[in-house]
Image (spheres, grey):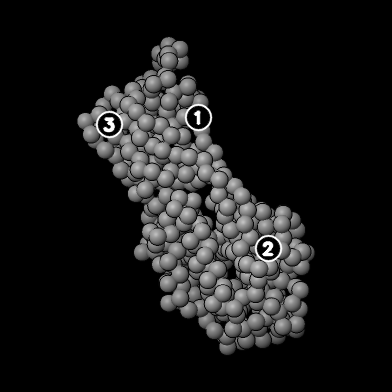
Amino acid sequence: MYRKLILSAALLAGNLLLAQDLSYTNKVLDTLTSPAMGGRGFVSDGHMKAANFISTEYEKAGLKKFGKTYFQAFDMSVNVFPSTMQVKFEGDVILKPDVDYMVAPEAPTLKGFFNLVLFDSTVVANKKKVDKMSQMDYENEFIVIDDSKVKDKDQKEFLHSMLSQPWNARGVIYLTDSKFTWSIAPAQATFMRIEMTHAAFKAATKRIYVDITSQVKKVKPQNVIGYVEGSQFPDSFVVISAHYDHLGKMGTATYFPGANDNASGTSMLLNFVQHYSKNPLKYSVVFMAFSAEEIGLVGSTFYTEHPLFPLKKIKFMVNMDIIGDAGDGITVVNGAIFTKEYDKLNEINDAKKYLPNIQKRGEAKNSDHYPFYAKGVKSIYIYGRGKSTAYHDVNDTKANLPLKNYTQCFELIRDFILTL
């Protein structure tokens, strides 16, 4: 009974506080997903432009710093594609990036004409033919893999093995009709790998022309960190986090806006900055906008190894990633571990009817909460579940982001934090 009275009081207080400003959300999303940000990656310093924008928003809200700046810098390397890229067949059939093909993020620089050698169901079904082909020199060849009609498990596994070991070929093309998704890589491979649609390959001649420039670039990303000091317990911290980086650009013409992943979480974080700067809690609230999540949780891992205050001082951490469509509700990673906090979220949701559904998962190394959790920090990661299918592609745009139940997610998390 006493616990329910405390929860009811917290919910009532939450209703009296400022709700999320959706117009501000749209302003942040428009800024972070704009072409000027270049996908918030490492071509054209998009990541730094985004960090500066977030820092300016912190400054406007009057957040305190742990040092002289909101930035926490670290060093890393990344493979980037800073120049025009061209893939075409003889006869000037020029292919469109992310429509007809996708270059692997670890691809090296390569330029020239290369012969095409097809491996499909008719080839792998003939063992003698495969044995003979395995003795050939593919130094000036691109091996083309088409497993669409291969039914035999061993034959399919053989073709897939060639994606990582293509017999010393200069490159490998994998034909697929699945949705293209991209990522980023810290280093280069020794051969070119390209995914291509079957429809695009129908225009193929005997040779392909490739002109792709890449370079391994040393960069200095920034975590952007500020806080609102608690009124009663300033040395005890609630952390709200989101990563602001995305995939950047694949050549000069193609960029990945990253609206849902994770401009959505970053805009919600900045809404909480607006909210708590006007409505401080008894605990200090720290806002951590991480960089280099997409390359393997690098920014958040760096923070846990170089914390700005003792990690044991963190009372709880809420991480938000891919939260721009919660039409079907949310999933709480670590909800199956921190059951008390997960139950609080459900109690609030049952009382206020914010979302249609809340689901729980166990631990998962899939966002920036994980390095903190691995160090013993109580943390959850919340992501939205909806109809949006854009992910790690050029269609993850502001225009395609429905923002269903976005305000409700904000209010649910706000009310939950009041109970900590």
Asked whether the beta carbons under mark 2 and mark 1 sit within 8 Å of each other, the answer is no
Q: Position of residue 142 (x, y in %)?
A: 38, 26
Mark 2 or 3, nearer chain start: 3
The residue lying at 35 percent from left, 43 percent from top is: 84
* Residue that carries the numbered disc 2 in the rendered image: 379
Q: Position of residue 410 (x, y in %)?
A: 54, 74
Most foreground residue, 168 or 63: 63
Q: Residues within 10 Å of mark 2 (few under 14, many from 20)?
A: many
The residue lying at 73 percent from left, 69 percent from top is: 315
Q: Is residue 29 visible?
A: yes
Q: Position of residue 93 (x, y in %)?
A: 24, 35
The residue lying at 71 percent from left, 63 percent from top is: 308
Of labels 2 and 1, the one closer to you: 1
Instruction: Say left or right for 305 vs 106.
Output: right
* Residue that carries the numbered disc 3 in the rendered image: 89
Instruction: Say left or right for 350 vs 103.
Output: right
Vertical relation: 65 (above or below) 379: below
- Residue at the left extreme? 91
Most foreground residue, 111 or 282: 111
How many angstroms separate mark 2 from mark 3 (CA)? 51 Å
Vertical relation: 21 (above or below) 188: below
How many angstroms separate mark 1 from mark 3 (CA)? 22 Å
Q: Secondary structure at mark 2?
A: strand
Asked whether the beta carbons under mark 1 and mark 3 sit within 8 Å of each other, the answer is no
Q: Amino acid at mark 2?
A: Ser
Q: Position of residue 168 (x, y in %)?
A: 47, 22
Of labels 1 and 3, the one closer to you: 1
Quadrant location of the C terminus? bottom right
* Residue that carries the numbered disc 1 in the rendered image: 190
Of labels 2 and 3, the one closer to you: 3
Mark 2 or 1, nearer chain start: 1
Vertical relation: 284 (above or below) 249: below
